[in-house]
Amino acid sequence: MMAPSPRRKIRVLIAKVGLDGHDVGARVVARGLLDAGMEVIYTGLRRTTEDVARAAIEEDVDWIGVSILSGAHLTLLPKLRKLLDEGGANDIRIVAGGIVPQEDIPELRANGVAQVFLSGTSIAEIVDFLIRETAHA
Amino acid sequence: MNVFKPPGAFGGPTASETSKDIAGESARWMAETFDPARPGGPERKKFATDVGIAVDPLYTPAHLDRIGFDYLRDLGFPGEYPFTRGDRPGMNRTEPFVVSAYSGFGDAQACNRRFRKLIEIGTEQILVALDLPTQCGYDSDHEMATAEVGNVGVAIDTLADMELLFEGIPADSLKRIGTLGNSIGPIVLALYAALGEKQGIPWQRYTVNLQNDPLKEYIARGTQILPPQPAAKLAADAVAWCVEHAPNWSPMTVCVNHINAGGAGSSMGTAIALANARHYIELLLARGLSIDQVAPLLHMFPDERHDFFISIANLRALRRIWARMMKETYGAKSPEAMACRTTVYGHGQEALAEPLNNIPRTAFGTLAYVLGGASYVYLAGYDEAVSTPNENSARVALRTQQIIAHEHGFSDTIDPLGGSYYVETLTSQVESQILDGMAQVERAGGALAVIGNGFGRRVMSEGAVRRQRAIDSGERPWVTVNMWPQKPDVPNTAFRGDAQATERQLARLAQVKAGRDQARVQAALAEVDRASAEDRNVVPSVLDAVRAYASVGEIVDIWRRRFGSFVPSTDF
């Protein structure tokens, strides 16, 4: 019999920030990550960046997956990164999913967003990325 | 010479004898000709629709026998009960479907220029896209509005913005004007009523169309503000006010659109939407209004994006179910109450990669609605998956509608697919699915209950996951996504929020708030609160508040304090 794995599961907070109410993508990704064996928490709609940062720190997650479709990404994502860093949680990393113009992606990367998955990305690609990039996985 | 001699005439076989022969002949064809022609047996894929109805290789009169097809009972004639073939007698021969645009961005000043351009190229109806702060009841200067002002629609804070938005566009110069405003129905109704007053145009001379369907927001669209019960009551207030003051308006459009797109599928989506419609109707009947007063003011917004023929079947089945429900369940007497008017928004399986391919996709999606007999037609911009349509994509969307309306003869005859073995079979199957869905919603407690008890959310999530798996596995073909896949791309030319428009909006709001008669505003807001507390129709008080330049956020804040806020679910 195998010894129980000492490694903890990857913990992910799926978040909606701002007023954008389209959360089908967020929920489908949440289900997909759960099916892939990760621990997943969903914030529900219409959270402020402060709410999301607080929840991520309290829940001690490895990743925050922010779903964003309303075009407010350049404001909200760097703000979330700043709040996490100020809260001593620079180990919590951010990925974003949704609609982000190509030219904004380098700017988001430079502001602490690890990866941007555009709508249409397969669940498998997201799962592979998170497993590959999580230190303890 | 009598070439088109009907079967059964002159002592020939009756219709049902003919189709019995055809059933036998179909089985023979399948065994002797079709099956042997399939090398190795299986067909190249499973032929199933998004709603789960399997598609046969061939449809014959035997299928009509199986569904017990009865022309006079099931179809009848356009403009007559049960309205399967059309809600209007002459359909597109006498009144072409209304070419419509859903548009809005930035502030009223920038948006007004776009509207004038849309009208110049032939738009007959404009539904104003509002930005998220407005839809969610926050003024542009609220903290929650950060980075959202003017992004997915135009910012409307007060009547001053409406005046500017429609400057040079008289309310009666279009067939209909309106907006969604699902969670702020009485306020947007009041804004359009006050706009007419400002322009000196009586309410009888123009037509306002609102979506004003808050119940679907909770499970599908996400702009909900209050708990569902008071939200539905406020939406019904808008309809009741119109019955008395503007019976020519259409103040409620009950939506399948977002429920289907969010995962429910078009049949279950239609079932949930009809349950929502019933909830609003029953609130209105409980006030002493009659079904013949209320039903003609309601529209339905059907939706099917995956399967062309299901889309046609859905519109036909919806009209039949609506007619029977109005007549049999509610005892409607007038044809106007039984004829289901439909607003549609043409989509396809739009993709981020190679967005120009979305032009044929949305055209086919829209064509299905037109063949299904839609009354008011919108068409998504090819870049809509990315952002608010730009001027070019808005123009293409409009031209596509005009081409469908006038070229190719698509709408030269009414209900051109009526009688098709395939379409009649699908119409009957879709009708059964919708009725079954309505029974499920009923068993789960009805429209309000399914929001809170997890039924609605489960239907949506399971459907969304099922669709994602069908795409990931390739079972649902999608060109450039799972066939000839291309990297998804969001072009840099996608519409971006305009910082200057936000500045202008904030300046205008500050100016309006400083320049209005504060005592009048406070008195009007106090009356909104009293009407809300006493369960009266809020529209008269909201109209007074809007006339006094009270803001959307100020009015909604009264309701937030009085009714509380809805707490979104964290289930997925």
Image (cartoon, helix red, strand yellow):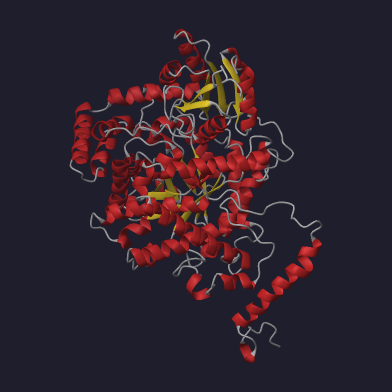
Residue at the image point whose x is 56% and y is 13% from the top: A111
Q: Is residue B526 above or below residue B243?
A: above
- Image coordinates of residue B484 in percent, x first then y, are 74, 39
Residue at the image point whose x is 40% and y is 52% from the top: B441
Q: Is residue B137 above or below residue B17?
A: above
Outermost front residue: A1
Q: Is residue B571 above or below residue B376?
A: above
- B170 horizontally vs B235: left or right: right
- B279 horizontally vs B377: left or right: left
User: Which image quadrant for residue A107?
Assistant: top right
Is residue A108 shown to the viewer in this render? no
Outermost bottom residue: B11
Seen from the viewer's position, the closer of residues B561 and B248 is B561
- Image coordinates of residue B342 in percent, x first then y, are 47, 55
- B106 horizontally vs B328: left or right: right
Is residue A15 shown to the viewer in this render? yes
- Image coordinates of residue B7 in percent, x first then y, are 63, 83
- Number of dots carrying numbers: 0
- Image coordinates of residue A98 in percent, x first then y, are 56, 29
